[in-house]
Structures are given as structure tokens and as C-alpha cells.
Image: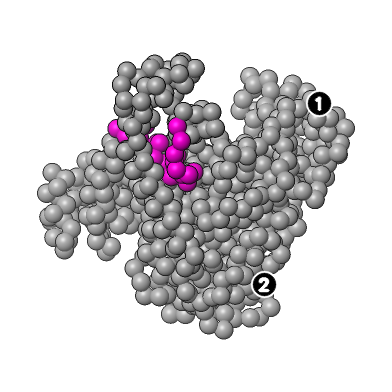
């Protein structure tokens, strides 16, 4: 059978890639080993957090699956970091592990241009040096001009439970993908290995909750999706406790039984999500480590024990679990484990996540050395959009670093590569005051409309939201507030009185004043009903106007460099005035612009200047003279 785009894998990257390609009108096939596990949350059933929550909302603004699936299956929602600046506000939701995959599949089945097929892809079909389709384990052959590989942890995946127990698996209960991994290696793709892990799960009926601090979610109307207002599920609490000296002693006594410290694993894992063994070894002075009990679903009592990821044997896991105050009688329902898997260095990809060395192939998700559902979903959207645009004969779309966290993610991967599992943080973005979670729709909704990713109803909804934004801006700039209206209210909050009538815009620049408080039932103002995101966005634009304008000026300066392309066929290894290390890195990354070249680690200012001189000497058409003139 013939398709435009074939997506291998039905995880978070694969689901978003298939959805995006089908939304653009490309005839798309998603092939995965178990259709019932499309969108499965293999680790913690949670989405969001710092930077990650913004990515999830960006994916949603582009018509993605994740935001709507989260909102419909939320058990526990919080907006993190609200006591800090708006650049680090972060939505996070705990979801129902069983219902989330069903919701993802429901959305995919709404896409008329998308077919689903259950099978394991055994090999890529290669014709005339390019990918032309896939061959599955049941002998089926499917042809396509574009294939998106989102294999997650399945490529030669190996689960470790202690130093001697090894299970070939892509995740617990699923076999690994071996033959495809071997073929990719034969085709010249050099695989490397990373590892990740999960904590044990426990039966919530065996927990003494009096020893834990209860944490309820927030119900203030915040959501991930811009397109609908799903109410979520009946809320469940999370619980916060700690692992103290008793747990530390058990782990220390059994370090040689750990797959990580017993020699069974040599691969690097995610630094920002360490195992309990790593915590004990690398932070020896820490007396306690936080433990979070998080619900798995409405129809189960099982809890996810966040903070105790491990590769120790099950009997040791039982011992350290029962050393946690409140878990003395805890019954472990699933042991935690570590998993090693193949990934490919993403600096071999171009900015659309295509692999130039093997035309017709795009890579997205953990196969590119990343970690996290949100990073996978973000790559899936970018790869799916660009694979479809390629088959439709349209120009590629590459998000810029000042346009979206997706642009930061993709540019970091293809320019810098990875030396550990990559995780997004707000600190990775130069323009984080512009890239906030509240303005994702304003930034990317018009892009989604222009590309053709939105349905008719979504286009109408986008227009409504944009009108709400402008209406809110006008109301804030035109409204005048009088001293007799405000001063009593300001006094109660410790704020200075206003001596005369002034604009609401000026009043909002005060740190103690918020639109939410002004318009509350006991607030001093009445006003129009305002869209939540529009209200937040206008307030942030008002309070931080100077900083935001500075970021925009810096972004424009960067854009000038990005707009000057480098020739795709530049013979960097022959540029003798450029250092050997820089030549090798330029030749490997093949940057598309001066700006991207400047971001490659190891490229010094003098290397960049000499690069421009070399290009001028070779008279690269439309690049060298103008670029050198500006840089000099």
C-alpha cells in the first residue's frame, strides 16, 4: 500500500507526528506494535512542569493531541512557580494512566487521512539510496515518500533489575526492536546508548497517609488546551514524604546489587532525574530526599513513588520502600527498573529533523537522545509537519528560537548534539520572557492556521481568542481608575495610595496589583469577561514591558544573523584558516546560517570570522560578501 507519510511508533512523538501529518492532508500510516498502547505513559502519568508545560501548550497550539488528552484525563493540576516571575510559571497535571492512551487514540481516529496498523517494523525499505517505506513482522510492505522514526526506548532496549537480571524489552511488557536497529547500523547510522529508569509502584491501601503531607490540586480554571474547556476527572491528592537515613543505609549496603553501580550499566542517564542510588552516592551529605506519592488513576489504588527511581533488585526495593515513614506496610505492585536503549546523535539531523545521510527519513523523540514526554511530543510535531510538507511539495517549517520552545529544543539538538539525555529548561532559552506558557496560542496559532493544521472550528476559535486578546489590551489601556475607587483596597494590601486618576495600565505596573485581584468579587473594579490567557498575557506584557522589549530587540538582532544562509555544499574541511576542531564540527553539523554556526560548541569568534573570510574568498553566491560586510 502507498502512503505519503509513515510513522513508526505510537508513543508521544509518534502520536503527534501522525496527527500533524494527517492534519496537513498527507495520507498517513502509524505503525505500532500494540494499538492499545498508543500514547502510553510508560513512566510517571504526568505532563508539564518547568519549560515542559510550555512545550505541551505549544504542541496544543499547533493542533496537537497532548493538551486535549491531558485536560480530559487530569486527576491533579497545579500551576507551578506562581510566586516567581512569569517566565517560569509552569502547568503540570497528573493524569489517569489508563484513560490517557484511550483519549490519544480517540483523537487519532478522528483524522480522516490517518490509518493505524498493529505490527512491528522489521526494516526500512530502501530504494535508490533513499527510504521508500517499511516492512513489518507480518510480511506487509507499506510504501511512502517520508518515514518518521519514533522508536523511543525500543531500539535494542534492555531492562535491568539488579546486576544479573536482564530482560530484552522496549519497556515493561513489550519486546524490543532488534532487526530495525541492526539495519540502521548497517546503513551507517552510529548508535550510542543511554539509560533511563522508573521507580516502584505501590498499593495505596497499604500507606499510612498520616505520615505524609497532603497536596491537593488547584481548581482555578487553568488548562493545557486552548481549543476546549474539558473539566477533567474527579480530583485526587498527591502526598509528600521523605526518604531518610534508614533508606540511605539500605541503598549504601546494596550498591553492588544495583545494575548501575554493579557494572551491568555503563550508559549515561538523565542527570536531572537521578536514581535513589545516584542521590545517595552523589549527595552524601543529604540527610533526606523527597518522596512523592502520585495517583495512577481513578480505577486503581496504585501509586507512583516519584523520587525513588532505581535499578536495585526487587527485594532491596521492598526493603527501602518499607524504610520510608508511612510505607512500613507498603505492598509493592511493580518494581522499578532501569532500561538501556539505542539513540542516534541528533547533530546529524537538519533543522526539520530529517536525516540528510538517508533521504526520506525523519527522527523524533528519545531516539534523538532526549528524555520526557513533552520533548518527544514537540519533536513529533516538528518532524510530522515537515515530513508532510515535503511530500506535499511545500516549504519546510522550522520554529525559531524566539518563536517557541520547540525552536530552542530543535536547534539545541541539531546544533549542539547531546552528551546526556536532553531535557528542556527555561534557562536554555535566551528569550524566555517572550516564550511563556500563557501566550503559546498568540505565538503559534497563526502559524498553525497558515500551515493548514487547524479545522474550521479551530480557526473560528483562534479568531475569537485573538479578538479577546486585543479587547483586553484596549480595556487595560483605556480604563481610568480614580483614587476613591482604589485607595481603600490598596491600603488593605499594604500598597501606596494613588494621588490622582490614572490609567489601569499604569496601575498594573505595581507588583502587588493583579487583574485577577482587581476583578475578584471583593475587588474594586468591574470589567468585561476576559479570556484567562488573554488576561494573563496582557498583565505580563504590562508589568514586564521593558524587559520584553529588550528581549524582542535581541531576537531581531539574532534574526539578522539567521537570515544570512551558509551554502549547503561548503567544503569546511578545506578552510585552513579555521581551527581543525571548528572545521570538523562545521562539517558534521552543516549549519544553515551564520547564527547557527555561532551556536555550535567550540566555534570561537575568531573561527566564525575566519569562516566568513573563507566564504568570501570562495565567493559563495548570495552569502559571503553581504554576510562579511555585516559581521565586520
Crowding at mark 1 (Cα within 10 Å: few <14, some 14-19, many 20+) = few
Residue 265 appears anywhere in the view: no
Q: Mark 2 vs mark 1: which is more N-terminal?
A: 2
Q: How is the image coloured?
A: one colour
Residue 27 appears anywhere in the view: yes
Disc 2: which residue: 119
x and y percent of residue 474 in the render? 33, 43
Which residue is found at the position 58% from the left and 43% from the top? 221
* Residue 210 marker: 1
Looking at the rendered structure, the secondary structure element under dot 1 is helix
Q: Quadrant of the C terminus?
A: top left
Which residue is found at the position 71% from the left and 56% from the top? 99
Name the foreground residue: 444 vs 28.
444
Main SS of the magenta part reads helix
x and y percent of residue 486 in the render? 41, 23
In this picture, residue 257 sits left or right of residue 527: right
In this picture, residue 244 sits left or right of residue 82: right
The picture quadrant where one finds residue 37 is: bottom right
Name the foreground residue: 278 vs 233.
233
Mark 2 or 1, closer to the camera: 1
Q: How far apart are the alpha carbons under marks 2 and 1?
A: 47 Å
Q: Does the magenta segment cover residue 393?
A: no
Which residue is found at the position 24% from the left and 57% from the top? 565
Which residue is found at the position 56% from the left and 75% from the top? 112
In this picture, residue 79 sits left or right of residue 353: right
- Residue 566, placed above or below residue 561: below
The magenta segment is 525-548
Crowding at mark 2 (Cα within 10 Å: few <14, some 14-19, many 20+) = many
x and y percent of residue 420 in the render? 52, 43
Amino acid at each position: 500500500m502507498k502512503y505519503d507519510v509513515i510513522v513508526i511508533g505510537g508513543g508521544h512523538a509518534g502520536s503527534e507526528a501522525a496527527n500533524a501529518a494527517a492534519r496537513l492532508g498527507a495520507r498517513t500510516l502509524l505503525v505500532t506494535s500494540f494499538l492499545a498502547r498508543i500514547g502510553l505513559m510508560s513512566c510517571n502519568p504526568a505532563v508539564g512542569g518547568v519549560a515542559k508545560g510550555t512545550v505541551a501548550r505549544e504542541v496544543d497550539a499547533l493542533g496537537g493531541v497532548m493538551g486535549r488528552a491531558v485536560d480530559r484525563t487530569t486527576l491533579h493540576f497545579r500551576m507551578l512557580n506562581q510566586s516567581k516571575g512569569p517566565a517560569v510559571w509552569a502547568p503540570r497535571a497528573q493524569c489517569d494512566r489508563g484513560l490517557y492512551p484511550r483519549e490519544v487514540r480517540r483523537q487519532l481516529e478522528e483524522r480522516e487521512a490517518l490509518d493505524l496498523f498493529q505490527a512491528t517494523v522489521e526494516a526500512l525499505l530502501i530504494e535508490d539510496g533513499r527510504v521508500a517505506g517499511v516492512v513489518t513482522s507480518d510480511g506487509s510492505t507499506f510504501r511512502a515518500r517520508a518515514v518518521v522514526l519514533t522508536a523511543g526506548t525500543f531500539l535494542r532496549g534492555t531492562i535491568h533489575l539488579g546486576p544479573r537480571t536482564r530482560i530484552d524489552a522496549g519497556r515493561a511488557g513489550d519486546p524490543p526492536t532488534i532487526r530495525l536497529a541492526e539495519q540502521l547500523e548497517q546503513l551507517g547510522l552510529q548508535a550510542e546508548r543511554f539509560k533511563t529508569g522508573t521507580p516502584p509502584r505501590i498499593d495505596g491501601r497499604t500507606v499510612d497517609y498520616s505520615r505524609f503531607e497532603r497536596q491537593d490540586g488547584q481548581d482555578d480554571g487553568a488548562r493545557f488546551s486552548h481549543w476546549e474547556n474539558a473539566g477533567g476527572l474527579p480530583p485526587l491528592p498527591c502526598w509528600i514524604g521523605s526518604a531518610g537515613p534508614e533508606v540511605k543505609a539500605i541503598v549504601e549496603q546494596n550498591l553492588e546489587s544495583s545494575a548501575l553501580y554493579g557494572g551491568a550499566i555503563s550508559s549515561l542517564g538523565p542527570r536531572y532525574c537521578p536514581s535513589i542510588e545516584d542521590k545517595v552516592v552523589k549527595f552524601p551529605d543529604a540527610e533526606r530526599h523527597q518522596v512523592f506519592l502520585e495517583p495512577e488513576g481513578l480505577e486503581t489504588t496504585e501509586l507512583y513513588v516519584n523520587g525513588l527511581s532505581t535499578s536495585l533488585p526487587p527485594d532491596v526495593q521492598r526493603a527501602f520502600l518499607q524504610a520510608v515513614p508511612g510505607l512500613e506496610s507498603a505492598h509493592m505492585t511493580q518494581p522499578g527498573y532501569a532500561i538501556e536503549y539505542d539513540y542516534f546523535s541528533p547533530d546529524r539531523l537538519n533543522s526539520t529533523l530529517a536525516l540528510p545521510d538517508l533521504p526520506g527519513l525523519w527522527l523524533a523523540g528519545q531516539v534523538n537522545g532526549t528524555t520526557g514526554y513533552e520533548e518527544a511530543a514537540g519533536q513529533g510535531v516538528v518532524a510530522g509537519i515537515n515530513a508532510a510538507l515535503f511530500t506535499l511539495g511545500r516549504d519546510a517549517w522550522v520554529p525559531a528560537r524566539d518563536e517557541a520552545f520547540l525552536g530552542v529544543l530543535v536547534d539545541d539538538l541539531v546544533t549542539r548534539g547531546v552528551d546526556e539525555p536532553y531535557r528542556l529548561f527555561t534557562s536554555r532559552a535566551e528569550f524566555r520572557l517572550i516564550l511563556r506558557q500563557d501566550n503559546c496560542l498568540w505565538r503559534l496559532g497563526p502559524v498553525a492556521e497558515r500551515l493548514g493544521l487547524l479545522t474550521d472550528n479551530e480557526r473560528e476559535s483562534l479568531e475569537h481568542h485573538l479578538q479577546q486578546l486585543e479587547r483586553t489590551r484596549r480595556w487595560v489601556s483605556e480604563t481610568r481608575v480614580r483614587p476613591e475607587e482604589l485607595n481603600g483596597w490598596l491600603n488593605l494590601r499594604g500598597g501606596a495610595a494613588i494621588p490622582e486618576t490614572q490609567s489601569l495600565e499604569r496601575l498594573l505596573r505595581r507588583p502587588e496589583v493583579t487583574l485577577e485581584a482587581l476583578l475578584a468579587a471583593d475587588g474594586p473594579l468591574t470589567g468585561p469577561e476576559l479570556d484567562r490567557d488573554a488576561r494573563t498575557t496582557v498583565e505580563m506584557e504590562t508589568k514586564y514591558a521593558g524587559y520584553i522589549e529588550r528581549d524582542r530587540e535581541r531576537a531581531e538582532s539574532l534574526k539578522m544573523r539567521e537570515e544570512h544562509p551558509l551554502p549547503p555544499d561548503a567544503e569546511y574541511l578545506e578552510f585552513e584558516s579555521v581551527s581543525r576542531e571548528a572545521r570538523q564540527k562545521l562539517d558534521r553539523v552543516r549549519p544553515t546560517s551564520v547564527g547557527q554556526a555561532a551556536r555550535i560548541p567550540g566555534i570561537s569568534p575568531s573561527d566564525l570570522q575566519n569562516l566568513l573570510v573563507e566564504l568570501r574568498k570562495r565567493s559563495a553566491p548570495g552569502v559571503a560578501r553581504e554576510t562579511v560586510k555585516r559581521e565586520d
